[in-house]
Image (cartoon, rainbow, N blue to C red):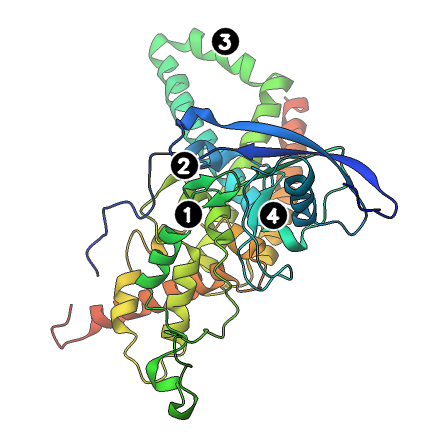
Amino acid sequence: MTETVTNARTTRLVVSRRKEGDDPGALRYDTFDVAVGPSTTILDALVAIRRELDPTLTFRHSCFHASCGTCGMRVDGREGLACVTPVPTRDEVTVEPLGNLPVVSDLVVDMNVFYDEFDEAGRPLVRADDLIPECAPAEGIDQVERYEDCIECGICLSACPVAGSDPRYVGPAALAAAWRLIDEPRGRDPGPVLSLMDDEQGAWRCHLAWECSEACPSGVDPAAAIMRLRGAAAAARVRRLFSFGGNR
Amino acid sequence: MASPTVEPRRPTTGPAHRRGLVGWFDPRGRRLGGLAFILNRLTGLGLVLYLYLHLMILSMLIQGPNAWDDFVDIALSPPFLALDVVLLTGMLFHGLNGIRVGLVGLGVVPNRQKALLVAALVIAALVAFVGALRIFAGEQGG
């Protein structure tokens, strides 16, 4: 780095390199020695690498302040947003893309599959009846921004050990979103979403490692949402069991 | 109940850092709940292994009293008794963690997993300690 870094030390970043279409065995790790200070983040270090050492290094970022959710990755095996993760005070730090999602290039993963899972929960927090007509989106904007804690970074899915072994599992983010709809239906019928998530690949696939909630940079606590979803699903089953309306 | 979705939601081929089943036992980067997840699986596998070992040992009875008495001598040796303490500890953790998982997993106390885990660990450690004292006291008392 050419910038002066106060109290600089040199840290070796070991960075995962892989391109879409590569043979699964083609993974390699490149090492970069970078000068870092006490407030240098992983994203700062990656930007410096790309600017001064290797312009082919690929990673995704946008806001630099943990609100866009685009720079999720794994640092020494632990998920976090690169923009707010300080470079650990170790001689060598390993940086890898999020797990359980297809790698597009180096540290960039394909988030489409993650968003598709979100869609299964109905993307519940901003609904048509919440919109104020006179505040309709400006011309050219199809969809308003949803105000919620989840920044859809995919970190929870990467941290989940069950998602790593079962690609059919809906995943923590979508289940947490489903719980929001059930907990706060705002006039909508939560039954279809509860029925969809009351499934062996839905809420019941979670094995309670709690990694999603620990890793979430926004405090969403998807695991507790999944547990509440289970409670609601179990209660609905009990109600059906003892109902005499024939809806068994 | 909805029809189970059998198609994978995420690709199973191509480049991806999927942890797979091996990842269940990878402690790198894991937090308290993740470590409990790993320990629960390790103790569960250990208990299954013990069950079959136990049945194999019981089958020695059909070889007659001498074979059984020879085994009992080994079973009362300090190294074997230490294994009993390991077994007891594993059983306690697995059972108590099972109660924790049941309480949390059915939404009874959905956000108390850490407190329940600490409680399970403390109870398991205390009972295992008392159990170890009694196991070795019994060995000394013959």
Asked if residue A64 is positioned above or below residue A22 in the image, the reply reads below
Considering the numbered disc 1 on the image, is that residue within a helix, a strand or a loop? loop
State yes or no: discs 1 and 2 in contact (Cβ < 8 Å): yes
What residue type is disc 2 on?
Glu
Between the residue at mark 3 and the residue at mark 1, the CA separation in whole angstroms equals 62 Å
Q: Which residue is mark 2?
A: A20
- Of the numbered discs 3 and 4, the one sitting upstream in the chain is 4
> Does the residue at mark 4 contact the one at mark 1 (Cβ under 8 Å)?
no
Q: Along the horizontal axis of the image, is A11 left or right of B78? A: right
* Label 2: which secondary element: loop
Secondary element at image label 3: helix
Question: Do tag 3 and tag 1 residues touch (Cβ < 8 Å)?
Answer: no
Residue drawn 41% across and 45% down?
A163
Query: Which is more toward the observer, A234 or A58?
Result: A58
Question: Which labelled disc corresponds to residue A110?
Answer: 1
| Label 2 in the same subunit as label 4 | no
CA separation, marks 1 and 2? 10 Å
Whether residue B30 is visible, yes or no, is no
The chain holding disc 4 is B
Q: Which residue is mark 4?
A: B32
Q: Chain of mark 2?
A: A
> Quadrant of the image for the N terminus of chain B?
bottom left
- Please say if B141 is above or below B71: below
**Label 1: chain?**
A
Q: Nearer the viewer, mark 4 or mark 1?
A: 1
- Marks 3 and 4, Cα distance to the nearest angstrom? 43 Å
